[in-house]
Amino acid sequence: MRLGKWIAIIFLLSIFAFLVPAIAASDHGVAATNDTKHSSTQETAHAVAETGHGGHINLGEVLPLWSCIPFACMLLSIALFPLLAPKFWHHHFGKVSAFWAAAIGIPFLIAYKGAALYAITHIIVADYVPFIILLWALFTVSGGIMLKGTLRGTPVVNTIMILIGTVLASWMGTTGAAMLMIRPFLKANNYRKNRTFMVVFFIFLVANIGGSLTPLGDPPLFLGFLHGVSFFWTMKILPHMLVTAGILLGIYFILDSYHYKKEGLKGAPVEEGEKEPLKLVGTHNFLFLGGIVGAVLMSGIVDWGQVNTFGIHRSIQDWARDGILVVMGVLSMLTTSKKIHEDNDFSWFPIIEVAYLFIGIFITMVPCLLILKAGLKGELAFLIAAVKEPAHYFWVTGALSGFLDNAPTYLTFFNTALGAFYPGMPEPQAVPLLMTETSIYLKAISAGAVFFGSFSYIGNAPNFMVRSIAEEAGTPMPSFFGYILKFSIIYLLPTFVLVTLIFF
């Protein structure tokens, strides 16, 4: 009870500390320190409300850097509560997410009114809703596919399973591949004592790095596809992916072999009992997976115009895609037997956790994304201006992708590169040149956005889902900081340094 009171007090103080400066900024003008840009915040907000989509850029020019505080608090909540108050977090993580969303939403709406409403509505309608529908569809359909039979997780078998998932990720999405492979992977290793590192490397490779070869693999690459990058251009980062995946798979095999031998399993006889041959059940769900992949691909090819939804202009084909995804998920639920779900240890908790936490993440990161999109006119102009070399693009895009949504981060530096090399040139003419004349910069942006999604739990949505499924299956997983300190820094950073030296 005492903990709950202290949490409530801290929360109230936090929102008060954020709300008062926000209202003051609205009254006195956030842009008072830069009169050449805007005469007052109120005038800017009014102008933004009238300019529709252009409002995103204007808000980014006037938002102060401290407006990102609720996002930082959201990340700290995800990092610290499971460690300091695990019972509270397990029962109330949705409320914590809602609180931080309100901590930015309320003062943001008071300070910027219509412009803030547009920004929040846009990220929910255009980003969060399709994001969670795609994850739900992939989670539901892949949860209806089960690998039955006797499979013993030896170092060789485990490495092959991760390799298969890594290959599949570029063609059915990192979420689809991760959800398809994680349950048989955990089942094959349920007799092993040390399973934590196995799941972490599974996240590295299957849930992230494997999705770097096609626009279907990861959302940033799909955004590039929508902006004119040809479908198979991303195969150009195959060498980068092979080096990264090869190093990490090699490290994984060495670690797995060490622990396998340490646990006294090397040369041990297989457990007695009737061996069941391997077979897939629920294979009709592959048809629904094909429908999901086809719907995503369709939405990037056709152009059926736009429709206005709550003031947000969104393509009709995007709504059609979301509708098809919902249908695929519902059909999977109706046609898959309950026994398959039960044997597969299927539950809705992982997708519910992602839905609750990511609505808070999406809303609280609105100011951060707007400031980034403002480029040289925003508070992060010093960072944008410092990005010049391919290595800069790789590391800055990657570092931000590890803790922000990697899709808009990719788009920000995609546009930064277009502006740097082809200023004033229309996008349809500039993008082909970026793919050819200055392709190393686009490779750096693409690789950074996808590879660094593995750096933290929030770098990519499948990371959270894999962690949740693993914990439900009895595999202890590291905390938010534990994941970064014990695994990402030790194994990912040296690998990315090597990729930089070879390619960028």
Image (cartoon, helix red, strand yellow):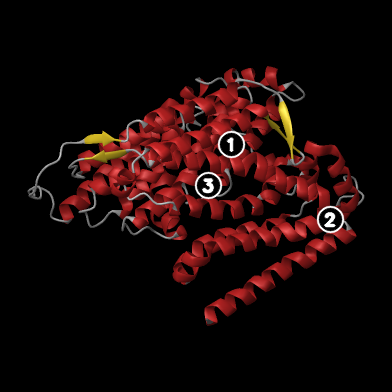
| Numbered disc in front, either 3 or 1 | 3
Q: Which residue is mark 2?
A: 30
Whole-percent x, y for residue 449 in the image:
54, 38
Instruction: Mark 2: give few (<14), some (14-19) or many (20+) Cα within 10 Å.
Output: many
Kind of residue indicated by mark 2:
Val
Residue 67 — which label? Answer: none
- Tell me the element at label 1: helix
Q: Nearer the viewer, residue 239 or 88?
A: 88
Locate residue 160: give its quadrant: top left
Q: Which residue is mark 3?
A: 402
Instruction: Mark 1: give few (<14), some (14-19) or many (20+) Cα within 10 Å.
Output: many
Residue found 68% across the figure and 41% down from its top = 384
Query: Would residue 448 be visible to someone looking at this image?
Result: no
Whole-percent x, y for residue 439 in the image:
56, 23
Locate residue 242: give its quadrant: top left
Q: Which residue is mark 1?
A: 393
Dots 3 and 2: beta carbons under 8 Å? no
Residue 298 vs 30, above or below: the answer is above
Residue 101 vs 275, above or below: the answer is below
